[in-house]
Image: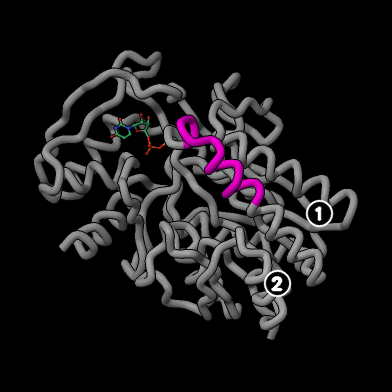
Amino acid sequence: MSKTLITGGAGYIGSHTAKTLAVRGRDVVILDNLSYGHRDFLKWGEFEEGDLADTAFLKDVFSRHDIEEVVHFAAFIAVGESVAEPRMYYENNVRNTLNLLGAMQDADVERIVFSSTAAVYGEPQTATLAEDHPLAPLSPYAWSKRMVEQVIRDYGEAYGLKSAILRYFNAAGADPAAEVGERHQPETHLIPLILHTALGIRESIKIFGTDYDTPDGTCLRDYIHVTDLSVAHALALEHLANGGESDIFNLGNGNGFSVREVIDMAREVTGGNIPVETTERRAGDSPALVSSSEKARNILGWQPQHADVRDIIETAWKWHQKDCR
Ligand code: UDP
């Protein structure tokens, strides 16, 4: 059977997608340099350890496996770091993606699902963001994703590359069976930091800004369960395999939760005392980022199964209790 290549498959969303695809009967090959990925997340499929900067390695991977489609996650993701080190971001996220696309073209692999981000929209002009919202990336990280989106679309026009570009809102939660979950080093994301506080690994959770123009003054985000995200990748691959048009899809639940609401829910789920410290706003944060994901529902038939923020926090809690033991 021909295989699905997953770059960055040892990372957070990549490993959940590897599980989802394997459960759906796909043969997967994971390509990861393990710079941020985790060896213990490699539980499904075959593993190729190497870097997208290495074109000879890429050529070799495509020659040894019968790959018919690619899901591309491998990228640096820290917004603040990208501002300080743009070269790292453009080289890793843009140049190395060009290497991947070149290797795909040389091997006649015509389908790609690309991991993009809601950060390509910049400051929201409307209460919810649809795919046709103007694009205004605010960081080299977001620009790197935006640039790759454009390259993929241009390759589609010129060379027939078929693509689904998936713009994620806030990925959160963990595999309900806790086989994989969220583990970043260093951790910067809200829900893991809250749960580390509940576990006593951190003393308090800082709320970045309480004077936003939102109901309780803290930022609103659209949290989407990582397993629901992974299923969207499977559906996008199937859409392209069945001859569906190249397209761009937002992935979120369409509901905004404030930082305080997330902390309150985590207190309920964990039963723990979660001390809070309020601090200044974090540079570059939008007051609210909430998706409209109607297109993914209508065209891909995507139906999030863990849309409840309690479910998201419960699965994350189960994972963190296991992972931080
Ligand atoms: N946040 C916070 N304290 C933290 C980490 C995050 O108040 O220690 C807030 C952050 O300002 C944003 C929300 O939580 O409004 C989600 O942040 P995260 O970094 O998880 O994801 P982002 O929205 O930046 O992609």
Q: Which residue is mark 2?
A: 59
Amino acid type at circle 2 is Lys
Q: CA distance from mark 2 to mark 1?
A: 27 Å
**Magenta stretch: dominant secondary structure:** helix
The one of 293 and 37 positioned closer to us in this rendering:
37
Q: Is residue 249 left or right of residue 205?
A: right
Instruction: Look at 60% across and 80% down and name the residue there.
Output: 27
Coloring basis for residues: one colour
**In the structure shown, which secondary structural element does the residue marked by tag 1 occupy?**
loop
Q: Is residue 47 left or right of residue 259?
A: right
Mark 2 residue crowding within 10 angstroms, few (<14) / some (14–19) / many (20+): some
Query: What is the residue that sits farthest to the right in this orientation?
Result: 158
Instruction: Look at 29% across and 33% down and name the residue there.
Output: 261
- Do tag 2 and tag 1 residues touch (Cβ < 8 Å)? no
Quadrant assignment for ligand 1: top left
Question: Can see residue 220?
Answer: yes
Q: Which residue is mark 1?
A: 245
Q: Quadrant of the C terminus?
A: bottom left
Q: Position of residue 242 (x, y in %)?
A: 78, 67
Residue 123's place in the image compared with 304, above or below, is above
Amino acid type at circle 1 is Glu
Instruction: Look at 23% across and 42% down and name the residue there.
Output: 194
Q: Quadrant of the N terminus?
A: bottom right
Q: Which residues are magenta?
A: 82-95
Q: Is residue 248 left or right of residue 289?
A: right
Q: Position of residue 143 (x, y in %)?
A: 61, 34
Q: Position of residue 150 (x, y in %)?
A: 75, 41
